[in-house]
Structure formats: structure tokens, C-alpha cells
Image (cartoon, rainbow, N blue to C red):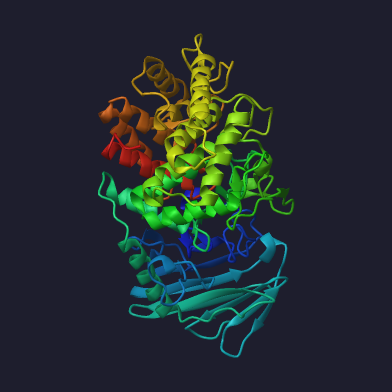
Amino acid sequence: MEQPPISDYAFLSDCRSGALVGRDGSIDWWCPDRFDGTAVLGRLLDPAAGYWRLAPLGPSRVQRAYRPDTLVLRTVHHTPTGSVAVTDALAAEVGARGHELGMNSPAVLLRVVEGLTGRVRMGLDLAPRPEHGLLTPYLHEQADGSVLASAGPVVLVLGGTGPALRADRDRVRQEFAVAAGQTVGFTLAYAPTYGDQPVRLDPVAALDDTIRAWEAFRESHHYDGRYAPQVRHSAVVLTGLTYARSGAVAAALTTSLPERVGGDRNYDYRFSWLRDFSMTMRALWVAACPEEASRLFAWAARSIGRVGEAPVPVLFGLEGERDLSEHDCPHLRGYADSRPVRVGNDAWRQRQLDVPGEVISAVWRLHDQLGDALDEELREMVVGLAEQVAATWRLPDRGMWETRETERHYLSSKVLCWVALDRAVALAPRLGERADPRRWAAIRDEIRATVLREGWNERVGAYTGAFGSAELDASALFLPVVGFLDAGDDRMRATIAMVEHELGAGDGLVRRWSTDPAGFLLCSFWLVECLELAGERDRARRLFERVLGHANDVGLLPEQIDPCTGAHLGNTPQALSHIGLINSAWRLTDPTTA
């Protein structure tokens, strides 16, 4: 079976978990319990790992779009005999409004078919495969016309408003006709085997309530800057990637979608990264609302706990879990035969010197909302992180791109150490007696001098990725973004130009390094910010608009883009790409923004 392009998929969310539905009407990814749980529909990573297809039996021309300000997808199929609309969503809790969205989501997929013109023969094909495809469930027809599927820790119930559903040995297959004006709805509800029963919902009523829940949530969010439609949609995507119970934002919905088809750089991104923390907070502040940013911050503070000598992990589970030990799934073929499929992410074990800078920068960004008097635990965390940076900044680490090779003295890591102490000095009046701003400032200035001296490569004519290295790295674009250097500085201008020329891959794409096989979208958005900060507003705007063109038909961005084919690569939808869009759009609106 040839798998659909990654760009074929649209994203559904209930702010507890998410699903991917293809243009062909097949839901090929759903981990119902939470984003980083196990899949019951996993055909994304193996043809035999489960799916739910609902579509016309014959060929159709497809048009699809989200309902405005929601992740409720409406797909219209035009066939030779008529047209139907299929509306897909993950159900909100009945009556949930505002920030209640996702707090008690019932884990129910909703699919409603509406006849528009003529008469269309439809096919339903459900093959659930729990535990990432390891289990084939028993199927039992129920007296109410539903089908119950059970295996291991999972119970699923498929229900509908049409004729009674019939089960084959290992799947449910059903054909039915829909005429203009008719509506048929289906639900697929999850529950743990040894917990509550799956929630039974009326699909049409639940769909209407879910639409209203999303609309009510977005009503409190306002963005008045440039590119408002794209920014608002990216904010909706970030909300959809937010695990509402804790406020953590998952880096992506998926695991192990490859950076290069057939390659082995396939990682699990269904966790929340502290490295992305300040960028995420800025995006939420710009395009969402302060409450979302505050909840994310509270999650991070609880996850970090008391700061000691051990490095703070770069990522945590969505409820603050620290041990995210990685393992391969050899039974899964991987997307387009890209192995291995990984669950968990061993980057949590790495030393990442940039983490304190991201966290302290986020505190600094929220300082007006947090008030003059930070609570004792928050003061202790900031002081502890600042002291950790003061003691460890000279050490090598694995760098922003989380290399699994030798530790080095990465430029971006040292710059984030500078950021940590620079923001700690600014916060010092609120940090109590343990704050040591004079010493922190001295170390901050020493870090800056070291970066300016050791990070610049005279032969290359640019700041490079690591001290003593001749390799360009797009992470150098981060320097003006965080205020380490003015974008108009002669050396910084030279670096920006060199990165654009040497790492640019055409069509607005920027590679992370010279041998990177694809353009990394966040780097393109950093370049937009650098050009704007350097006063090249027209070039920045044109670049931004070219990068927008890499979104799929429903406005989703992956991690990377193949520069030769334009294909989406890497895990999707990628939070950092949408964060980069929001932050660079705001930079184009207000170049003075921090």
C-alpha cells in the first residue's frame, strides 16, 4: 500500500488527544487517551496498524476546510451521482465553553455525513488495532445496533444513527446510500478496559456542541496584527496541540514521521519541550490569551521541581513526567518504510545548557502579569537556574538540534546561557536575598565576550554553529531574535547573508546545516525576523509569504519541507512551525517587540 503524502492529512483535536484524517476520508492516527498514548488507529506508521475510512465508494473530487476558528473539518466529496459532506471532529465535553475545552474530553470521534445533491453510495470501513497495532480486538454486535471492540487495555464502541452496524471477524464494513437532505452520523468512543464505559453521544448534537465550544474558546482571543487569518489559524492549531488538563503544548501530534523518507532520523515529538518555552509563551501571548500562557508556565514550574546540580531535562511528558525512555517498535514498518518507529525520546537524558535561558526568559516575559512579588517557589527556581548556568556555562552540550553524537560548545547554547543571566539580572529585584545580580552580570558579560570571540569564524566570515567550527548553522539567526546582537551589527549582517546564501534551499526554505536534506520551517521564520530587524522589511514580507505557501490545503505546517518536491516531512502538525509563523507575523507588525 502506498501511503498518502503527509500533506494530505488534516488535524482533529479535543485538547486531550488528536487524530489525522486524510483527503481519502481515512482516519489513520488516533491515540485516544492522550497525545502521547498508544494508537488504536495507526495506519500512518504501518498499513496493518488500524484505520477508519468513511467516504464514497467510487472516485470523488474533494474540497475541504475547517469551520472558522475550529478544528472541525468539513470535507465535500463530489461524485458522478451527487455530492456529500463529511464533517469530522473530536468531541468536546457536552456544554464545555471557554477554557473548559479539553478538561474532560470524552474521547469520542464524531463523523457526520450530509447529503448535498443527488444520491451517493458511501462505504464505512473500521479496523481498530490497539497498542500501536499489536492487538486485534474481538468485535461484538450490540442490541442497540452498535459494535463493541475490546482488546487488552482498550474498549471502543462504534455507534451510528443509521441501520444496525455489522461486524466481520476483525473489522466493521458497511455500505449505505445518502440522498440530498439526509444526514447519517457515527461515533467511535474510547474507554480503558478497567475504567468507565465509553461515552455514548448523539453524533449530530455532539458535533453542533463541539463547534460552539471551539467558537466560544476563540472569542476571547484577539490578534490585530498583520496576516491575521494565518495567525488566528496557527493559534487554533496551538490550542489543539495543548493538553488542556496541564497546559502543556505538545511539540507535534505524531511520532516517527521521517526527516527524510527512508531515513532513520525519526523521533517521538508528542511531548513538551522547555527549549521551545519562551518562543511558545511569546506566541500564546501574541495570538492566544494570557491565561493559556500562564497555565503553560505553571506546568513548567511544577515539572522542573526543585533545581539542583543535575541538568534540567529539555523535555517532559504532558503531565510533567521526566523519564521518557525511548524504545523502538520493530513490528511497525514506519511511514513509507522509514524505520525505526520510536516511542519515547531519549533527549531527556541530554545536557542542554539552553534550557534555563528559555525558562528564565519566559518568567521575564510574564513579569508584569506575575506582579512585583514572585512566590517563593518561583523565586527559588529562577535563582537555582541562574546559579546552574553560572556554574556550568563553560561545559559542552548536545545543542539545539539534540545531536546524538559528541558534545560540543554550541553557539546557540552559550547565547541562551547569556539570556538566562541577562534576564535573571533584570528580575533580581523580585528574587529575594539569594539573588546575586552583580556576579550574574559579570558572568553574563564574560559569556558575551566569549561568544563574540570564539563564535566568529574569520575564514568563513560568519558566526558558526559551534566554537572552532567552520560549519554554518541556521541557529545563528537566533542571536538578534533574543536580543544578543543587533541585526544591523556588521558581523551579524554578514552571518545573516551567509546563512541565507549558503543554507537557503529556494522557495523561502532554510536548512539547519549544509547537509540537512530539507528546509526547516522555523529557520525560515527566524530569517524573516532577522530581515525585519535589519530594516529589510520588503524582503522580510516577501520571504514570509513564500513560507506561508508551504502550508497544506487546510493551513497545517510540518517540521520540514523537501526543497526538491515541496513534500511535507517530519512530525505534523509541528508546533514550532506555527509558533514561528505567529512570532514572525508579529515582528512584521511591530519590529520593536521583545
The one of 223 and 159 positioned closer to us in this rendering: 223
Residue 187, relative to residue 443: is it above or below? below
Residue 442, relative to residue 278: is it above or below? above
Q: Is residue 88 left or right of residue 139?
A: left
The one of 449 and 274 positioned closer to us in this rendering: 449
Residue 425 lies, in percent from the top left, at 46, 33
Q: Is residue 107 left or right of residue 373?
A: right
- The quadrant holding residue 66 is bottom left
Residue 313, relative to residue 236: is it above or below? above
| Quadrant position of the N terminus in the picture | bottom right
- The quadrant holding residue 31 is bottom right
Q: Is residue 2 visible?
A: no
Q: Is residue 313 visible?
A: yes
Residue occupying the point 59% across, 52% down: 303
Residue 430 lies, in percent from the top left, at 44, 43
Residue 424 lies, in percent from the top left, at 48, 36
